[in-house]
Amino acid sequence: MLVRFAPSPTGYLHIGNARVALWNYLLARRAGGRFILRLDDTDQERSRPEFAEAIREDLGWLGIAPDVFVRQSDRLERYALAFERLKAAGHLYPAYETPEELDRKRKRQQARGQPPIYDRSALKLSADERASLEAGGRKPHWRFRLSGHTVRWDDAVRGPAHIETAALSDPVLVRADGTVLYTFASVVDDVDMAVTHVLRGEDHVANTAVQIELFAALGAGSPIFGHLNLIAAADGTEMSKRTGSLSIRSFRADGIAPMAVASVAVLTGTSEPLHAVASLEELAPLVDLAKVSRALTKFDPAEIVHLSARLIHDKPFVEVADDLAALGIAGATAEPFWYAVRGNLTRVAEAAAWWPVVAGIITPVVEEAGFLARAAELLPPEPWSQETWHAWTEAVKQASGRKGRALYMPLRLALTGRAEGPELKLLLPLIGRARALARLAAV
């Protein structure tokens, strides 16, 4: 199996893009195949190097490591050769309408209740008429002549599928300025790279019929096509690279766990229950095209935040050590500190707010100074363990007659400065006796 993910570097990847990339990557890994990252960057006006770099960074953040990396802008000579081959075989024809003229044609057709497809008027031009247009400064764009037949294929997701190409416009393969369009470049690449499976969103179904005819025109067999159902935010928000809606970069900046994004991207719109999956290795066995729904599926972006918190609560120290070090959390105390606070975090960065509690200076909240003074007298000597909190509070309970909130809340407020937080049986050994005494005695 050889698959490809071919985004255009015109914006940041969103979760819909990640869905397609992850499905391709995980299916290839399961089959022992290979994954190509191919940037569709032939449109030099809209493509940006910063977006190209961002695509690679975002895929890496999700754990996707391409086996092959290709830029379509490096293959322009290959497209030129394929173009000449199609032209010589009579599959292409020049058309001279400007975008404005084409737009007016479409509007007239719609006003008459007709489908807004290209009327092939360029085919009626004589050689003299074409020469006259070109002498007047018109440069042709080049269209691929569709057969007008029914194109059928066995879709890997949708099952038997067909498109009537008579209902489609002959696609433009090369613009008047010489820019090669996706429909054409993609097929040439898939042929040259021997791509076996093309898995993409179902908004490309009509493109598939066109491309199957292009494969045939180039003398090549078609890969297996599969079209995943689309996903959208619960409020119907359209995902777009240009608007940054639900972008992978925004999740990264917000401190979301990458596998939370991957879990939602892959499992949403399938019969597999949505849940947090800890690694791509664990997610791969759940990837099954037979489980994909054919309906548009909506999801709540809050699910990603929820799953992220679940994943963070289970993360071992080794996976976050570098992130914690970047927050200034390091040393022998860092590991037990992580296990003490992780259950109270939704993002790793939130650990920084708890670090001063065990390794720095806080402002204790002192309520009932007399009670705290008596509690300080009962603090046991070190060394301390996770049993120290229970032993100490039991002694304070016996001495004061307090229990429940009246016993525990004044101690928590003094020791941490907060009314809620991680278990004190875990924090107290890290705070240490000297800090605990100072905070209990603070006025």
Image (spheres, rainbow, N blue to C red):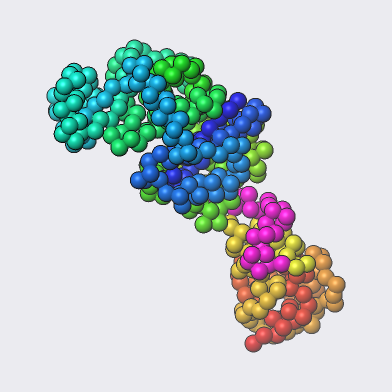
In this image, 159 relative to 325: left or right? left
The answer to which of 127 and 221 lies nearer the viewer is 127
> What is the count of numbered marks?
0
Residue visible at 59% across and 51% down? 257
Q: Position of residue 295 (x, y in %)?
A: 43, 29
Res 407 → quadrant: bottom right
Residue 157 is at least partly visible in this image: no
Q: Position of residue 439 (x, y in %)?
A: 69, 81
Residue visible at 38% across and 41% down? 43
Residue 70 is at least partly visible in this image: yes
Q: Is residue 309 magenta?
A: yes
Res 288 → quadrant: top right
Q: Is residue 20 magenta?
A: no
**Image quarter of the C terminus:** bottom right
The answer to which of 271 and 397 lies nearer the viewer is 271
In this image, 95 relative to 73: left or right? left
**Image quarter of the N terminus:** top right
Q: Which residues are magenta?
A: 304-330
Residue visible at 46% across and 16% down? 219
The rendered magenta stretch, by its main secondary structure, is classed as helix
